[in-house]
Amino acid sequence: MSLDLWTTNEGLNVSLADMWAYSSNLFNSTCSVCHSVPKEEHLLANQWIGNLNAMKRYTSLTPDQYRLLLGYLQNHSMDVHENIGAH
Ligand code: HEC
């Protein structure tokens, strides 16, 4: 059998500011272990894909955390952050 459940999205959505704050903490705690934590603006959005992929094996990020962190870095990267005013 199957059961469909419906709910409102109230309480399921976190605010963007909360999500970025969580991501920022994750970034600072995960990426400061071996070297000083790089600036989000250090790389272009496209470059973060390869860099984070290279750093992945050094971390214990879950797949969800990895995707969130990549989204955070790309949205705050050299070529994107000014355009969306994310800082
Ligand atoms: C276990 C150690 C370790 C951890 C944790 C780590 N790094 Fe690195 N990182 C390195 C080493 C070693 C290098 C230099 C050699 C290399 O590039 O592989 C480096 C280099 C870098 C560079 C420099 C590349 C460049 O273009 O100048 C960046 C940016 C970077 N890491 C980002 C990150 C990010 C983001 C995280 C968190 C997801 C992270 N690192 C976590 C070890 C680590």
Image (spheres, helix red, strand yellow):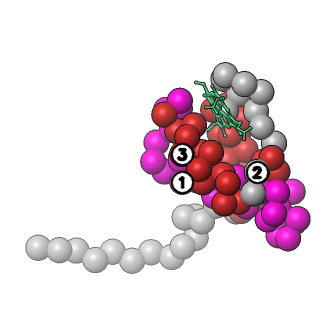
Q: Is tag 2's residue or tag 1's residue first in the polypeptide sequence?
A: 2
- Magenta residue check for 78: yes
Number of marks:
3
Percent x, y of residue 40: 78, 48
| Residue drawn where x is 60% and y is 54% of the image | 49
Examine the residues drawn in magenta and state their main secondary structure.
helix
Q: Identify the amino acid type marked 1.
A: Arg
**Secondary structure state at the residue bearing disc 3:** helix
Q: Nearer the viewer, residue 7 or 40?
A: 40
**CA separation in Å, label 2 and label 1:** 17 Å
Percent x, y of residue 38: 77, 37
Task: Write the start and end of the magenta stretch as one range.
Answer: 58-87
Q: Identify the amino acid type marked 2.
A: Leu
Vertical comparison of 60 with 15: above or below:
above
Rendered image quadrant of residue 51? top right
Q: To which residue does mark 1 refer?
A: 67
Numbered mark located on residue 28 in the image = none
**CA separation in Å, label 3 and label 2:** 13 Å
**CA separation in Å, label 3 and label 1:** 11 Å
Looking at the figure, which quarter contains the N terminus?
A: bottom left
Q: To which residue does mark 2 refer?
A: 43
Q: To which residue does mark 3 refer?
A: 53
**Secondary structure state at the residue bearing disc 1:** helix
Tag in front: 3 or 1? 3
Q: Identify the amino acid type marked 3.
A: Asn
- Evaluate whether residue 18 shows in this view: no
| Residue drawn where x is 66% and y is 23% of the image | 33
Q: Is tag 3's residue or tag 1's residue first in the polypeptide sequence?
A: 3
Q: Nearer the viewer, residue 58 or 47?
A: 47
Rendered image quadrant of residue 39? top right
